Structures are given as C-alpha cells and as structure tokens.
Image: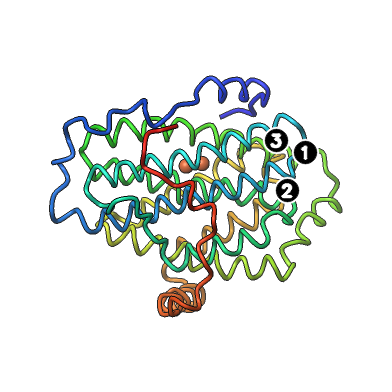
C-alpha cells in the first residue's frame, strides 16, 4: 500500500457509493444460520452495528477538523458509509430474524461508554490524534470482526453485503494510513514531541479508560464466537506493520504509542495490564441501566429498511 493520491481517492469514493437496495435481502440462504450459531451471532452483530457507529462518529469529528477540503469531503463520505454499514448489518439481522419490528438493538455497556465519550470530546480532539486512533480501531474492530463473520457464516447475502463493506473499509484504511504518514512527515523532533502532549490530557485519559476495556470486551466476544483470539491480534498487528512502512509513518509519535499499546493488549500473559482491564469490563457490565448515558438521538437514523 503506497501513499495514495487523496484527490483520486475522493473520485473513487464518489464512484463507489452503494445503497441497501442494491442487495436482495430476501434471496435464499438465510436458512444456513444454525440454531446453535444464532444467539452468539446475534450478540456479535449487535456489537458490529455499534462499532460502525463509533467509527462513523469518529469520521464526523475528523470532517470538522480536517486540514483541507479533500480530506473533509472524504471523511464526510466515510461517515455516511459507516452508517450504511450499520444499516446493512441490521438488514442482515432482520433477515436472520434477529430484530423485532423496528427495534434498534442496544449496544453493550463498553460501547455505550465509548459513544458517550465521543459525543462529549471527539470534536475537540486534535486532528492528528483522531487520525492515528481511527486506523487502529478500523483494523482491529471493523476489519478483523468482518473477516471473522465471513469465516463463520455461509449465507451468500451476507457475503455479498460484506464485499461492499470491505471495499469501503479498504479505502478508509488507505486514507487513514496516508494521513498518519502525512502527520509524521517533515516535522522537527520538538514538533513530534508536542504531538504527544494531548496524550496527557485528562479527557484523553478518560478515553483510554473507555477504550482499553472495550478492546478486551471485543476479544471476549470473539472468543465467545468460537474464534481464535490470535486472529484478532494478527489483525491488530497490521496497524504496526502498515503504519510503520515508511520513515514518516514511524516518526508519528501517536502511532508509536498505539502500536506499543496494541502489543501489550495482544499479550495475555501481561497481567499488569489485563487484570485491571478485565476487572473494568466486569465492572462496567454491572453498571445499572439507569446510570448509563442515554443512547444519543442520532440513533433514529438506524434502519434496516432499504429506502436510501
Ligand atoms: Fe465500517
Ligand atoms: Fe471504516
């Protein structure tokens, strides 16, 4: 993956827009989901729908702070694409009998906290921080989880939908890694060190307290689906590999912090990390409903209906 031309990428993105109506959601194949698979798959899909939203919210914030018009437009498209992914995944859930009427499935507590945090802080986060965090989340949560799904589900309609979703994702990653390199490019050491300052910002520390348990929770869900967790770590390691493919990329200090954290996360024997973080997952699971932040109002945009 070489540095990409963002202008050309924007043209490509414009040309590859799709809609839910492009897929025949009633085509045969739904019966391939086994009764045994069904409940776990439902949980997994709910997480996936919400992760798309977390990604979408991140892109909305990046569109606001983008350094130029091309990137602003790209992020605006990506925001819409993540919502489309969420809706396509809901359409699959509907097809598999996992949704009642117009009900929108509730996100798990860790995702709910992540959404709340994004709602409060994402728009104020420095662009270069969001720009380095987003590809990390995309390779791990979005990229890896979608791939897992295709390994366990035979339904051809699911494969058809994810072919489109994964195409979009590869463009998100292409732009994401290019931006990371741009941020590390032609900067002095002092400037590079300054890029790390927000890491000590209390708002970002709260963000880590939300992000770390979210990753562990996702790992648990992957294991629950009967998939080897190593696959998740392999996907996460792509961040380090691709992000570090050039000097400029490796110079980006936020990239380095995240790559380092990924390695810690992937090492289960590191009890100093995993004990407290797993304890946080257990703790957040026990937060009573009434103390949880309200699901934000834009959730109304979620629909499995093929109208748009
Ligand atoms: Fe997505
Ligand atoms: Fe994405």
Q: Nearer the viewer, residue 301 or 130?
A: 301
Disc 1 and disc 2: Cα gap in Å?
8 Å
On residue 72, which mark appears?
Answer: 3
The N terminus: image quadrant: top right
Snapshot quadrant of residue 26? top left
Q: Nearer the viewer, residue 1 or 217?
A: 217
Relative to 167, residue 281 above or below: below
The C terminus: image quadrant: top left
Q: Are marks 1 and 2 in contact (CB under 8 Å)?
A: yes
Query: Quick one: label 1 or label 3, which is nearer the N terminus?
Result: 1
Snapshot quadrant of residue 307? top left
| Point 18% across, 53% down: residue | 37
Question: How dense is the environment of label 3, judged by Cα within 10 Å: few (below 14), some, or many (20 and up)?
Answer: some
The answer to whether residue 76 is left or right of residue 141 is right
Query: Quick one: label 1 or label 2, which is nearer the N terminus?
Result: 1
Residue 182 at what x, y percent from top left?
73, 37
Q: What is the image's colouring?
A: rainbow
Question: How dense is the environment of label 1, judged by Cα within 10 Å: few (below 14), some, or many (20 and up)?
Answer: few
Query: Quick one: label 3 or label 2, which is nearer the N terminus?
Result: 3
| Point 71% across, 63% down: residue | 199
On residue 127, which mark appears?
Answer: 2
Residue 209 at what x, y percent from top left?
58, 71
The answer to whether residue 270 is left or right of residue 261 is left
Residue 38 at what x, y percent from top left?
20, 54
On residue 67, which mark appears?
Answer: 1
């Amino acid at each position: 993956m070489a540095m990409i031309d963002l202008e050309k990428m924007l043209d490509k993105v414009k040309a590859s827009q799709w809609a839910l109506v492009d897929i025949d959601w009633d085509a045969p194949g739904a019966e391939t989901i086994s009764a045994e698979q069904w409940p776990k798959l439902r949980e997994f899909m709910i997480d996936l729908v919400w992760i798309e939203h977390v990604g979408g919210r991140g892109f909305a914030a990046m569109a606001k702070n983008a350094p130029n018009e091309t990137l602003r437009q790209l992020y605006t498209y990506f925001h819409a694409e993540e919502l489309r992914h969420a809706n396509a995944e809901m359409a699959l859930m509907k097809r598999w009998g996992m949704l009642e009427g117009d009900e929108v499935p509730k996100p798990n507590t860790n995702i709910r906290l992540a959404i709340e945090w994004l709602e409060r802080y994402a728009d104020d986060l420095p662009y270069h921080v969001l720009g380095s965090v987003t590809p990390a989340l995309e390779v791990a949560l979005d990229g890896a989880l979608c791939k897992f799904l295709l390994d366990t589900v035979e339904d051809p309609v699911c494969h058809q939908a994810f072919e489109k979703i994964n195409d979009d994702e590869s463009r998100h990653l292409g732009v994401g890694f290019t931006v990371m390199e741009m941020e590390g490019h032609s900067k002095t050491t002092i400037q590079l060190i300054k890029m790390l300052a927000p890491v000590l910002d209390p708002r970002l520390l709260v963000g880590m307290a939300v992000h770390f348990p979210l990753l562990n929770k996702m790992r648990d869900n992957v294991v629950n689906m009967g998939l080897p967790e190593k696959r998740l770590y392999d996907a996460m390691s792509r961040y380090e590999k691709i992000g570090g493919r050039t000097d400029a990329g490796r110079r980006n200090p936020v990239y380095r912090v995240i790559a380092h954290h990924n390695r810690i996360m992937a090492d289960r024997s590191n009890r100093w990390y995993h004990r407290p973080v797993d304890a946080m997952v257990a703790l957040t699971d026990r937060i009573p409903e009434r103390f949880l932040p309200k699901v934000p109002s834009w959730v109304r945009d979620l629909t499995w209906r093929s109208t748009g």
